[in-house]
């Protein structure tokens, strides 16, 4: 419609016909510019949120991996301590058993040497 209005005015004033109209330096309404700016800002905020989400996921995965490694270290340490305690306990038990076996053997030798029986 604007092309026809311009063409009619130029035809009337200058006796010329307009074949093509090219617009330059268009001034848009302030409200429209504000909406466009707001939309661009929101698009940037969405992109930022997506990047922050990706970073948070990466950090979470890293934290989980680190926690798993720490748990594995703690488990290995506990297993090693348990092995040391088990070995120490077995050694102590063997020593006590050996002591009582020695007592039993001496008791048996004394009983045999003096021809004693369990009844007296």
Image (cartoon, helix red, strand yellow):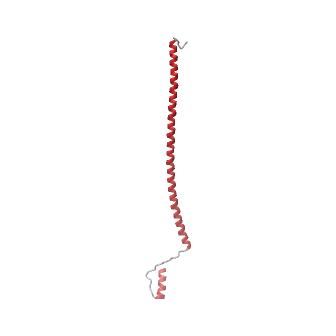
Residue at left 52%, top 14%? 111
The residue at the far top in this view is 115
- From the viewer's side, name the closer residue of 66 and 35: 66
Residue 119 left/right relative to 21? right
Q: Pinpoint residue 66: horizontal percent, then vertical percent.
A: 50, 47
Q: Is residue 100 above or below residue 15?
A: above
The residue at the far left in this view is 19
Residue at left 54%, top 68%? 37
Q: What count of labels does the image hold?
A: 0
Quadrant that contains the C terminus: top right
Q: Pinpoint residue 33: horizontal percent, then vertical percent.
A: 54, 71
Q: Is residue 80 above or below residue 11?
A: above
Q: Pinpoint residue 81: horizontal percent, then vertical percent.
A: 51, 36
- From the viewer's side, name the closer residue of 50 and 9: 50
Quarter of the figure with residue 38: bottom right
- From the viewer's side, name the closer residue of 11 and 49: 49
Q: Pinpoint residue 18: horizontal percent, then vertical percent.
A: 44, 83
Residue at left 52%, top 38%? 78
Q: Is residue 107 above or below residue 8?
A: above
Residue at left 53%, top 64%? 42
- From the viewer's side, name the closer residue of 17 and 111: 111
């Amino acid at each position: 419609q604007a092309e026809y209005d311009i063409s009619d005015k130029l035809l009337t004033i200058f006796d010329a016909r307009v074949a093509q109209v090219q617009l330059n330096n268009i001034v848009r309404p302030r409200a429209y510019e504000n909406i466009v700016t707001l939309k661009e800002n929101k698009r940037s905020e969405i992109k930022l949120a997506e990047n922050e989400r990706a970073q948070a996921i990466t950090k979470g995965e890293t934290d989980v991996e680190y926690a798993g490694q720490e748990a594995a270290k703690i488990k290995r340490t506990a297993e090693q301590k348990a092995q040391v305690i088990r070995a120490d306990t077995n050694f102590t038990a063997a020593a006590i058993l050996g002591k009582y076996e020695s007592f039993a053997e001496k008791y048996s030798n004394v009983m045999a040497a003096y021809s004693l029986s369990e009844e007296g």
